[in-house]
Image: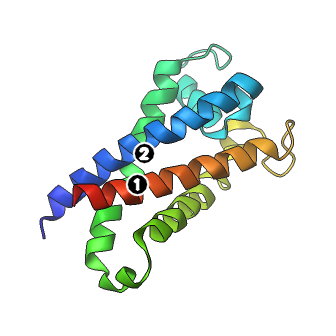
Amino acid sequence: MDTVALLVEGLEAGAISTVFMTALETVFWREWGLSGVLEWHENQMIWSRLRGSDRSTLSFFGIFSLHFLNGGLAAAPFPLVVALLPSLAVVPLVATGVLYGILLWILTLFPIHRPITGVSLTNHPQGFLPVAASFLGHLIYGVSLSLLTVLMT
């Protein structure tokens, strides 16, 4: 097993999976604006803090740079974990990808969204829909990540 190759495959699969997630999120962004796409909103706030720029001036370069960086890095260990844990073979890989997407959604959204954006997920000004859209995006990310992992390994 080539650990580095598996990590690189994970990075690539994560970046491609982020493309699918982003395509879905674009629909919600057009409907609800930046605060309606939770991950983009976080990335905008982080980017503006890093750059010392106005938070209200959209930086699609910053939003998408961080989005794809996070998507790639989050997926990097996925093929390695699948290879190292043969017990996962009893679970269809797509289900493992779905669970991975949900895990990322829980670990990366709930603890950081409010501190970064100032917007509560449980009392979002646009209701529950942005949270549901984010969940759906992470499901698409997880499914595509698992399918790409099968194709790449």
Reply above or below: 57 against 41: above
Residue 38 seen in render: yes
Amino acid on which the number 1 mark rests in the picture: Leu
Q: Residue furthest left?
A: 2
Q: Which residue is mark 2?
A: 17
Q: Secondary structure at mark 1?
A: helix
Q: Position of residue 111 (x, y in %)?
A: 65, 55
Using the image, determine if residue 85 lies above or below residue 100.
below
Q: Residue at x 30, y 64 (%)?
A: 79
Q: Depth check: 48 or 25 in front?
A: 25
Residue at mark 1:
145
> Badges 1 and 2: C-beta atoms under 8 Å apart?
yes
Name which residue lies at 60% across and 16% down. Answer: 58
**Is tag 1's residue or tag 2's residue first in the polypeptide sequence?**
2
Label 2: how many residues lie within 10 Å, few (<14), some (14-19) or many (20+)? many
Residue 118 vertical position relative to residue 146 in the rendered view, above or below:
above
What's the residue type where badge 2 is placed?
Ser
